[in-house]
């Protein structure tokens, strides 16, 4: 009898190197050091949403701008956090778990995060 292999259709939780960003159900973006550096190490960002394409946009900003979101150091490894629950609530972006965006790109100074390409990186809950 021939083997009946089934290809694994999941994704690795984390890729080595490159840009990496997640968004969780609490409206928190976590950004790795390479992406933070690629965005020119901003102290804050402006957030945008395109409802026609379900794409989140993020652009470097000054912390003194009234609608900017601060970027804070999250841990000693250099991961940064943006707490943006008010943004995800306004645009009704509801997530059950933590989601990553494959190959986030910076185009003309704007980080683009299409919601259609997101994938779940949450750990399964223990029973």
Image (tube, rainbow, N blue to C red):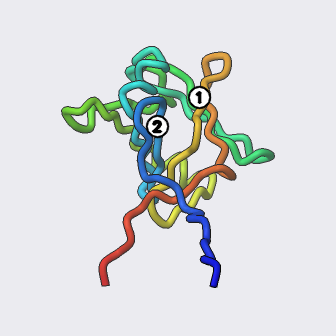
**Residue 15 placed where, x, y %?**
44, 41
Mark 2 neighbour class, 10 Å CA radius: few under 14, some 14 to 19, many 20 or more? many
Label 2: which residue? Answer: 20
Please tell me in which quadrant of the rendered image residue 17 appears: top left
Q: Residues within 10 Å of mark 1 (few under 14, many from 20)?
A: many
Quadrant of the frame with the C terminus: bottom left
Left or right for 65, reference 115 = left
Q: What is the C-alpha distance between the residues marked 2 and 1?
A: 12 Å
* Image spot of residue 1 (x, y percent): 63, 85
Please identify the residue farthest to the left as the structure is shown: 76
The structure residue drawn at horizontal position 45% and vertical position 14%, both measured from the top left corner, is 40
Q: Which residue is mark 1?
A: 111
Coordinates of residue 57 in the picture (x, y in percent): 62, 34
Residue that lies at the very extreme toward the right in this rendered image = 52
Identity of the residue drawn at 38% across and 33% down: 32
Q: What SS does tag 1 mark?
A: strand
Q: Nearer the viewer, residue 124 or 28?
A: 124
Q: In the image, residue 66 lies at what x, y percent?
A: 48, 27
Image check: 21 left or right of 117?
left
Residue at image position (49%, 66%) is: 96
Up-down: is 35 above or below 10? above
Measuring 61% from the left and 17% from the top, which residue is drawn there?
Answer: 109
In this rendered view, identify the residue nearer to me: 29 or 5.
Answer: 5
Of the image marks 2 and 1, the number of the one nearer the N terminus: 2
| Above-or-below relation of 5 to 59 | below
Q: Give the number of marks.
A: 2
Q: Seen from this angle, which residue lies furthest front?
A: 1
């Amino acid at each position: 009898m021939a083997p009946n292999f089934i290809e694994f259709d999941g994704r690795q939780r984390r890729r080595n190197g490159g840009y990496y960003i997640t968004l969780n159900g609490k409206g928190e973006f976590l950004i790795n050091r390479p992406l933070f550096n690629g965005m020119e190490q901003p102290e804050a960002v402006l957030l945008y949403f395109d409802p026609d394409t379900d794409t989140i946009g993020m652009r470097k900003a000054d912390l003194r701008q009234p609608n900017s979101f601060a970027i804070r150091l999250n841990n000693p490894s250099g991961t940064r956090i943006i707490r943006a629950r008010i943004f995800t609530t306004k645009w009704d972006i509801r997530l059950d778990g933590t989601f990553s965006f494959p190959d986030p790109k910076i185009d003309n100074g704007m980080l683009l995060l299409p919601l259609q390409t997101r994938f779940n990186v949450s750990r399964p809950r223990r029973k």
